[in-house]
Image: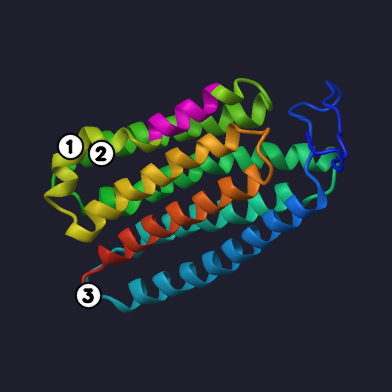
Amino acid sequence: MNPSREVFPSASRYPGQISWDYDRAEIIADGAVHAIGVCLGFIGAVTIVVIAVKMERIEVTPILIYVIGLVTMLALSAAYNMWPISPAKWILRRFDHSAIYLLIAGTYTPFLAQMKSVLASTGLGVGVWLSAVIGIALKLALPGRFDRLAIVLCLLLGWSGVIAYDSLASTLPGASVWLLPIGGILYSLGTVFHVWRGLRFHNAIWHVFVLLAASCHYWAVLACLPWA
């Protein structure tokens, strides 16, 4: 462990509290990543909604659901990771982890709306959103419990679209078909750094992977618009 780090021991006093042992350089690096992410997220959200509203052949609601999930995740992640050590930080941690499920389900929504098979779209949509709601409820009600298992569940939920690959691939443009798994791979690789707490700057590196993956999925959604 870096001797310059100030270690805040975990305590049972606050549910979900963990050891927060990042030094100043790590916090600055992570803050820079979050600042970039929040700014790009808001710009991207406004841009894609404006484009969708101007198009007559596009349903705006799935796009709104997606951008709400994206912006909420970015904002809560920045708030939690940049908030000083205090009881409020551990409350923010609950919402930050919950927002991951919201982002996954929200990202699926525009693509499900494009599918020609109503049965496949409805079945996968209900499964994804039901799983997301359960995950959110568990994270809010049981903070700090089953954290490693939650990572596995997020990955399984994120990759659940593979079961409807044929329906998605036959509907979505080629760019989206490629960008979706690339984003999924980046998220999956990023989790290695997320759990590698012994690596300096691991948190900032993890969040870089999140931004790259989210960017891939953003462009995948954009490619689905009629003009793309």
What is the span of residues highlighted in magenta in the rendered image?
Answer: 149-157
On the image, the x and y values in percent for residue 115 come to 19, 49
Q: CA distance from mark 3 to mark 1?
A: 27 Å
What residue would you read off at disc 3? Answer: 227
* Amino acid residing under circle 2: Thr
On the image, the x and y values in percent for residue 41 come to 53, 64
Q: Earlier in the sequence, mark 3 or mark 1?
A: 1
Q: How many marks?
A: 3
* Amino acid residing under circle 1: Leu
What residue would you read off at disc 1? Answer: 119
User: Is the N terminus in the top left, top right, bottom left or bottom right quadrant?
Assistant: top right
Q: Residues within 10 Å of mark 1 (few under 14, many from 20)?
A: few
What residue would you read off at disc 2? Answer: 122
* Amino acid residing under circle 3: Trp
Residue sitting at 83 percent across and 20 percent down? Answer: 12
Q: Nearer the viewer, residue 4 or 143?
A: 4
